[in-house]
């Protein structure tokens, strides 16, 4: 096994989305447009809202990719143009495959909007291969109790396995292309090694603490991109750290992108806009 080196470090920047929701975004930015097959990562919070302050993302369309929402604190309610309704709370994951198109909303829960409360979570956008871009939309919702977890033999590393496998635990989520999505917690003095095929693109995003990736030290809201020069990633922490480790097989397909539409050609983007404007998104 060969340890991957790092290709660089990016610090996430805050910006507003939806109806004024503050997110911290490592990509897409001017420095990194995408990391095939990943299109976007947003950190929502952590923030404590007063009554009436919490913001979300009212009705908006998607076509041609997947959104993966992972809630750490608080709760999010969603609804869409096909009549689906749901709620995900702390530790839960929603993996939405937009496919041919949905119009949906993602809002803090009614009680948080009304009474205030704490919100923290992530949303990852995963591109779909050409063959799946017009598939029927679907949702996979996993409660925290349904998501596998594992610990290292010395007890210093705990991993929540959202997609892929780690430390002997395998995720139950069904992904359209091979994906690894891990929430890794390291205590002081921990060292963690995760196998990742050399063909995968991979990155880590630090939630807190300080993590050492060989020649790169990353802190809160730093994203570390790995070279494809090895088949495992090594992470260490002297004083403890918490991070997401995400990897996937690149699609190597053309990407045409306009807001919430991600297709392969400009013509497909124009068609998506026409379909949305004429009510063909369910």
Image: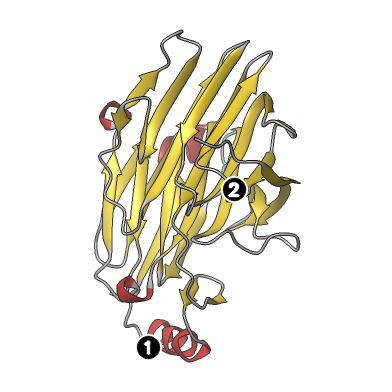
Q: Residue furthest top?
A: 154
Residue 247 x/y as whole percent: 48, 47
> Image height check: is 35 above or below 266?
above
Q: Residue at x 46, y 67 (%)?
A: 60
Q: Residue furthest front?
A: 1
Image marks 2 and 1: residues in contact by CB distance under 8 Å: no
Query: Looking at the image, which is closer to me, 121 or 34?
Result: 34
Q: Residue at x 51, y 32 (%)?
A: 115
* Label 1 secondary element: loop
Decide if residue 252 is on the left or right side of residue 212. left
Which of the colour schemes (rainbow, by chain, secondary structure, one colour) is used?
A: secondary structure
> Image height check: is 120 above or below 174?
above
Residue 267 x/y as whole percent: 48, 92
Decide if residue 201 is on the left or right side of residue 217. left
From the image, tell me which residue sits under label 1.
Answer: 278
Residue 52 x/y as whole percent: 57, 41
């Amino acid at each position: 096994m060969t340890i991957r080196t790092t290709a660089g470090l990016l610090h996430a920047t805050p910006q507003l989305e939806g109806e004024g929701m503050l997110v911290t975004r490592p990509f897409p930015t001017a420095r990194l447009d995408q990391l095939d097959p990943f299109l976007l990562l947003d950190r929502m919070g952590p923030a404590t809202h007063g009554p009436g302050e919490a913001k979300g993302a009212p009705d908006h369309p998607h076509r041609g990719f997947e959104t993966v929402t992972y809630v750490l604190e608080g709760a999010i309610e969603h609804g869409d143009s096909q009549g689906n309704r749901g709620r995900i709370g702390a530790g839960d994951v929603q993996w939405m495959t937009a496919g041919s198109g949905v119009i949906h909303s993602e809002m803090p829960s009614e009680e948080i909007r009304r009474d205030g409360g704490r919100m923290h979570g992530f949303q990852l956008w995963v591109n779909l291969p050409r063959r799946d871009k017009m598939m029927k939309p679907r949702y996979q919702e996993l409660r925290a109790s349904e998501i596998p977890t594992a610990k290292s033999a010395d007890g210093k590393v705990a991993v929540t396995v959202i997609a892929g496998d780690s430390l002997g635990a395998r995720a139950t989520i069904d992904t359209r292309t091979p994906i690894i999505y891990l929430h890794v917690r390291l205590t002081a003095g921990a060292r963690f090694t995760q196998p990742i095929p050399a063909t995968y693109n991979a990155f880590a995003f630090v939630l807190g603490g300080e993590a050492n990736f060989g020649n790169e030290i990353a802190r809160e809201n730093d994203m570390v991109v790995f070279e494809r020069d090895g088949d495992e990633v090594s992470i260490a922490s002297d004083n403890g750290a918490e991070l997401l480790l995400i990897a996937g097989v690149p699609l190597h397909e053309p990407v045409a992108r306009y807001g919430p539409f991600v297709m392969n050609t400009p013509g497909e983007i124009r068609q998506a806009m026409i379909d949305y404007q004429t009510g063909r998104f369910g």
